[in-house]
Image: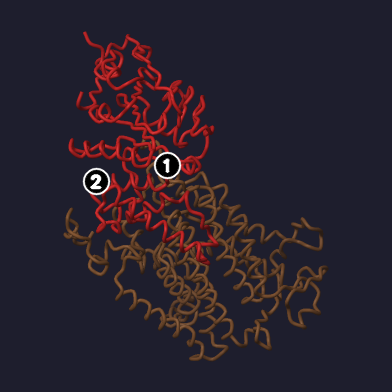
Amino acid sequence: MSDEPNLKKDADPAAEPASATGTITPPPEGKKLMVVDGASKIFGGLVAVNDVSFSIPEKSIVSIIGPNGAGKTTFFNLLTGLYRPTYGTITFGGKDITGTRPDKITSLGMARTFQNIRLFGTMSALENVMVGQHARMKSGLVGSILRPPWQRKEETRVREKAREMLDYVGLRPQIVEEMAINLSYGDQRRVEIARALASEPQLLLLDEPTAGMNPSESENLTQFMRKLRDDLGISILLIEHDMKVVMGVSEYVTVLDHGEKIAEGLPKAVRADPAVVEAYLGKQG
Amino acid sequence: MGTPDLTKGATAPVPAAGGSKKFALRGSGGGLSKNANRGAVVLALLFAVLLPFLFDPTSGFINDCVLALAYVVMALGLNVVVGFAGLLDLGYVAFYAVGAYSVGWFASTFYSDASVHVGVNDFLDKLPGVHLNFFLVILLAMILCAIAGVFIGLPTLRLRGDYIAIVTLAFGEIIYRFAVNGDEITPFGDAYPLTNGQQGIGPLDKPQLPFMSEPLTPLELRPWYWVALGMVAIAVLAVVMVRDSRLGRAWIALREDEVAAASMGVPLVKTKLLAYAMGAALGGMAGAFLGFFATTVNANSFKFSFSIFVLSMVILGGLGSIWGVVLGAVALSFINYWLIPDVLNTVPGKIGLDFQLDQLSFGIFGFLLVIGMVLKPEGLLPERRRKIELTEGVGTDQSLEGSRA
C-alpha cells in the first residue's frame, strides 16, 4: 500500500480490468463547486479519459487516485483548460467552462500546481508569486509605461500580497528574493503552492504534491491542506500516489484506471474495494 | 559555471546583492551600487547631450551618431520581442519599412492630388500633398507599425522558437516585395499607390521642430542628434518601465514556460501580441526618423539583411539586457557607418589588395558575431536571467505532453 506498485503487467491480459467497476457512491449532497459530466479525451486512437463524471463539493478535499498512466493528469489538464474535452461538459461555480482558455479559468478561480514543478526558474520566488496574481491585476502596456498612481499602488499591493503568501506557505523571508532554481526542492513546492494561491482560487488542484517528500514532510503538507481549506474556505482536488496522504486527508476519493472511473466513495470503502485493489496490485490468484 | 556559492546552504541567509552578483536579482541591489549606477548614468547622459559641440555641425561623425541613436531605438524594440518575450523575429525590417513609408505617405508631395496640412510651417502649407507635423507622423508610424506587428504576430501565435523565425522571415521578405512593387498596388485609387516602387519617395518634408525658426536640414546635424537622443531616452524609459511591470513579468513567464504561464492566468495571445506591438512601435518610431533623416524612402533599404543587422546588435549586446542592447547597437552601427567605410576602408588597397573593406562588411559582421558568441555567448552586458538560462538550461520549454502522467 505504500508505494505505487504498478503491477498491471502481471494481470491476466484476457481479463477486462476496465469494465471491472467497483462501488460507486455518489458524493454527499450539497452545493457543488465543480461538476464534470461525461468527460472524455481522445488522443488519436488513445482514449486517455473515458466518460468520467465527477463533482467537487464546496469546501472539501477530494482526491483522484489510480495507477500510473490511468489518465489522472490528463483529467487534470481537462479541468484546467490545457486540453479541451473531446466529449462531455465541465461546470465550475455554475458556469460552463468546457473548452475555456486556461488563463480565463484561472481568473474564474481555479489554480493548480504541476507534478514536475514548473516554476519560472530565473524569476525570484517573489516574482513567481506576483505572476500568480496576473489575473487579479489590471495594468497593461500603457499603464506600465506611464505608471499612474493606481498602477503603482497595485504593484505595491501585489508585492505585499506575494510576501504574505510566501510567509503563509512557510518560506523563510530571507530567501523570497532568491531565484526559483536556487531554492531547495521543498521550498520550490512551497513557492508553487503560494503562486497558485496568489490567484485567489476557490478550487486548488494539486498534482502529486508529495512526490519526492519524506513521510514527515508529507504529513506536514497534509496538515497544511486542511489548514488551507479551513482558513481560506477553498476546495482542494488532489492527485496522489501516496495512499497514506490520500486516505488521511480526503473526504472523498475517485479512482481512475485506464481512463475510466472504477470506484468512487469514502476513503475507507474505496480502499477495501476489490476493483481498486485489483487495479493497483493486479488480479489475485 | 564559476565557483559555486557556498553560502547557499539551507540555513544561511541570502547575501546582499553585492555579495553574490551571480544570483542577485535586479531590484534587490544594495543602495551603494544603485547610487553609483545612477551617477554613471547621469554622467553618460551629460556627455551624450554635449557631444555634438565637440564636432562640426556637418561632421560625418555626428551623422554616424544620429544613425547609431536611431539604431539603438530599433534594437530596443526588437529586444522587447526577442529578448523579453522570447519570440525570435527575423522580419523586423517590416517595421523600418512601414515607419519610413509613413513619412512618404504623410509628409511629402507623393500624394499630390490630396491636400492635407496639419501643424506644418508656411512653406509646406503651400505645397500639394499630405503634410503632417513631424511628431504626428512619428506617432502615426508607431500606431501603423503596432498594427502591422499584431498582424505579423498573429500567424506565429501557435508556433514556438525556430518556427516563429521562419514565419517572420517570410513576412520581412513580403514587405520588401510590397515596397518594390507597391507602385502598382492602388487600393485607394490610381492617384494613391502604396509605394513608388524602385524610384522611391522623395523629397520628404524637412521636420519643423517647435521653438526653431528653420526646419531641420542636413547642414545642421546637431538638432537631429538631439531629437534622436530624446527618442532613445523615451525608448529606454519605456522598456525599463515595462520590464519591471505586470506585463514584463508575464513576458518572462511566457518565455520560460508557456503552459505554466497560461495556468497562472497569463493570456498567451494578448501577451504575445503586446510584445509584437510594442517592439513594432519602437521600430516604427526609429524607421520614421530614419526616413526623415535620409530625406527619401528607398525600397532597396528594406532587405532581410537589415533584420539580421538589428538582431546582431541585440545578440551581441546581450539578449534581454537593455543597456547591453544599447551598447550593441552603438557598437555595430559605428563599425558599419564609421569604422569600416571611413577609417579602414582603404587599408586593403594600401597593402596591395584590389578591393575596399566596405565590400566585406557582412563578412566582418559575421566574423564579429562568431567571435562574440565564442568569447561571450550571453552578450557584452548580459542580462542575469538569460545568462542562467544559457548556462543551466532553464526555460528550454517543456512541452505539455511532458507533464502527462
Q: Distance between the residues labelled 1 and 2?
A: 24 Å
The residue sitting at 47% across, 55% down in the picture is B88
Give the structural element (helix, strand or loop) at label 1: loop
**Chain drawn brown, letter?**
B
Q: Name the residue tied to disc 1.
A: A201
Which residue is label 2 attached to? A185
**Which residue type does callout 2 highlight?**
Tyr
Kindly identify the residue that appears in the image at 81 percent across and 63 percent down: B191
Instruction: Using the rendered image of the protein, determine whether residue A175 is visible from the camera's viewpoint.
Output: yes
Q: In this view, does A172 lie above or below B291?
A: above
Chain A display color:
red
Q: Is residue A273 left or right of residue A158?
A: left
- Image spot of residue B43 (x, y percent): 40, 83
Q: Are marks 1 and 2 in contact (CB under 8 Å)?
A: no
Residue B126 occupies quadrant: bottom right
State which tag comes first along the sequence, 1 or 2: 2
What's the chain of the residue with tag 2?
A
Under circle 2, the secondary element is helix
Q: Which of B108 and A282 is in front in this view?
A: A282
Residue A53 appears at what percent x and percent y? 45, 22
Q: Which of A186 and B161 is in front in this view?
A: A186
> Do dots 1 and 2 share one subunit?
yes
Query: Which residue is located at x 70 percent, y 63 percent?
Result: B197
